[in-house]
Image (tube, grey):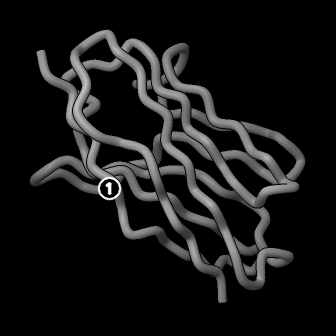
Amino acid sequence: QVQLVESGGGLVQAGGSLRLSCAASGSIYRIHTMGWYRQAPGEQRDLVADITTGGSTNYADTVKGRFTISRDNAKNTVYLHMNSLKPEDTAVYYCYAAEVNGVYYWGQGTQVTVSS
């Protein structure tokens, strides 16, 4: 089992920045990829960004150039640095961790609200 604890998020004005953190514990040796999804009210949950243990990253087109995902393997923590935030970035952001065998674990979610 893997446990994920998220922190960060909150209310920010458009154009501002936030950083989300996600700390993993438990059977972390099984984790290959960690990242973030987000879900706005009435919308599906969509991938924002992810990063592998090797450091390969992947971003949704909507956040490329504004968000940066990073990973501290020593701390088993993934960060999402969000810059130039827009009102359409408002959503609940969920951290996830994926094992090589396809098992996913999820954080509890953290609210990000961007005011115009």
* 14 and 48: which is toward the camera: 14
Instruction: Locate residue 96 relative to residue 57 in the image: left or right.
Output: left
The residue closer to the viewer here, 3 or 106, is 3
62 in relation to 74, above or below: above
Where in the figure is residue 28, as x and y percent of width and height?
78, 75
Which residue is rendered at x = 48% and y = 59% of the image?
6
- SS for dot 1: loop
Q: In which quadrant is the N terminus drawn? A: bottom right
Indicate left or right for 66 with 24 as reference.
left
Above/below status of 80 relative to 5: above
Q: Which residue is mark 1?
A: 45
How far across and how far down the image is residue 36, in percent?
A: 50, 50
Q: What x and y, as percent, mark residue 88?
A: 21, 27
Answer left or right for 94 relative to 97.
left
Residue shown at 59% from the left, 51% from the top: 35
How many labels, in total?
1
Residue 47 place in picture, x, y as percent: 46, 47
Amino acid type indicated by mark 1: Arg
Residue count near mark 1 (Cα–Cα under 10 Å), binned few <14, some 14–19, many ≥20: some
